[in-house]
Image (cartoon, rainbow, N blue to C red):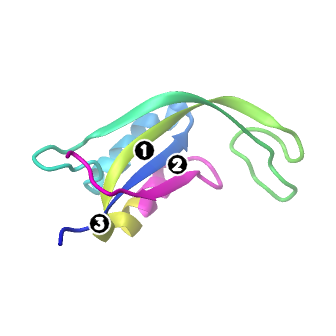
Amino acid sequence: MSERIYKLEIFVPESHLGAVREALWSVDAGHIGNYDRCLSWSRVNSCWRPLEGACPYDGRAGELSQAEEIKIEVCCREGRLAETVSAIKSAHPYEEPVINILPLAGTGL
């Protein structure tokens, strides 16, 4: 049986798209068959409210914030998942980065 594949959804300010993309590529995220560096991104509108004690990249504790962000989507092999999440966090400016990890039934079918 082949290794399980996950799709990661990462929300990041546009200013950090390049840094997070390079971090993903440094750990071979986005490797599908005979291709590597496969990922996509799109603009999304997001909102959040930092709670007391938070140290937000953008916004202030107790106030609702909203901004345009970039959602990066990339595949990752199970054996490199922890390394990939660590690489994302090292390049991401947020105190609590949103990284959704979704198991895939298949990719590149």
Above or below: residue 88 compared with residue 18:
below
Q: Residue 59: x, y in percent? A: 78, 38
Above or below: residue 64 compared with residue 79:
above
- Is residue 101 highlighted in magenta? yes
Q: Which residue is mark 1?
A: 20
Left or right: 48 in relation to 42:
right
- Identify which residue is drawn at 50% across, 37% down: 71
Label 1–label 3 contact, CB within 8 A: no
Question: Gap between marks 1 and 2, in whole Å?
Answer: 6 Å
Question: Gap between marks 2 and 3, in whole Å?
Answer: 25 Å
Closer to the N terminus: mark 2 or mark 3? 3
Q: Which residue is mark 3?
A: 4
- Identify which residue is drawn at 36% across, 46% down: 74
- Identify which residue is drawn at 26% across, 40% down: 38
Residues 4 and 66: in front is 4
- Identify which residue is drawn at 38% across, 60% down: 84
Label 1: which secondary element: helix
- Label 1 Cα neighbours within 10 Å, binned few <14 / some 14-19 / many ≥20: many
Give the numbered dot on residue 92: 2
Label 2: which secondary element: loop
- Label 2 Cα neighbours within 10 Å, binned few <14 / some 14-19 / many ≥20: many
- Is residue 50 highlighted in magenta? no
> Which stretch is magenta?
85-109
Q: Amino acid at mark 1?
A: Val
